[in-house]
Amino acid sequence: MKIFKLVFSPIEVNTYILADESGKCAILDCGCYHEPEQEVLVKLLESEKLIPVMLLNTHCHLDHVFGNKFILEKYNLRTLSCEADEINRKNATQHSTLFGLTMETPPEPESFITDGQVLTFGDTELVALHVPGHTAGSIAFYCAKDGSVFTGDALFSGSIGRTDLPGGNYDTLINSIRSKLFVLPLSTVVYPGHGNKTTIEKEILTNPFFGS
């Protein structure tokens, strides 16, 4: 699986393109805010000859769903997300004003993801891991074959997601990371919603939020 990272919007969210050998791809946390960012995404897909067949959201904070309307209009794809995060999708327009930004309410999801659900595109399988704490409906996507996990804003390189927003809970997030992410193979590469990639082993050993 090829993984492309694009950083979008004033909030600098990581948008990932997960490309399968079949030429099909999944778009994860599409954060395109301006038309030029939309063009960057389209040009990447066209240059790599990729066909988007799936749109995924780790959670529905505004920066992670900025581009959902564009993807629906351009590729006729609605997102797959967790039902527990619907409140964030519905409130995204209101939240955007706090950042001095504007947006329409993101489109309704195609369907809701549940913990342990296996999602497939081409020959690739992703397992949905419910990791609440940053938001109630945070989902990580694990690809065992590729040795990678996409953690949204649950786990970062050297940090964790904030828990002071509605639906957030510190103890819940710590437990989610320990029980759902730190049990993955140590070599698993972590692709977070912001910042640089890391590994499960590195975070177990050095993340300051977890004692030895």
Image: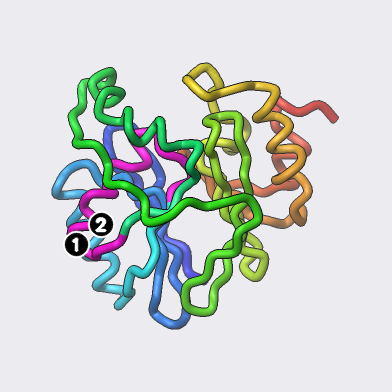
Q: Circle 2 — which element?
A: helix
Q: Residues within 10 Å of mark 2 (few under 14, many from 20)?
A: many
Above or below: residue 39 compared with residue 88: below
- The location of residue 87, given as percent across then percent down, is 41, 31
From this view, report whether residue 18 is shown above or below residue 91.
below
Residue drawn at x 61%, y 22% as measured from the top left: 169
The numbered disc on residue 74 is 1
Q: Which residues are magenta?
A: 57-77
Distance from the alpha carbon under mark 2 to that under mark 1: 5 Å
Q: Is disc 2 in contact with disc 1, using a CB cutoff of under 8 Å?
A: yes
| Residue type for callout 1 | Lys
- Residue 50 in percent (x, y) is at 33, 74
Neighbour tally class for label 1: few under 14, some 14-19, many 20 plus, Cα within 10 Å:
few
Q: Quadrant of residue 53?
A: bottom left
For the point 30% across and 77% down, which residue is it?
A: 49
**Residue under numbered circle 2:** 71
* Relative image position of residue 59 (x, y in whole percent): 46, 40
35 to the left or right of 33? left
- 75 within the magenta span: yes
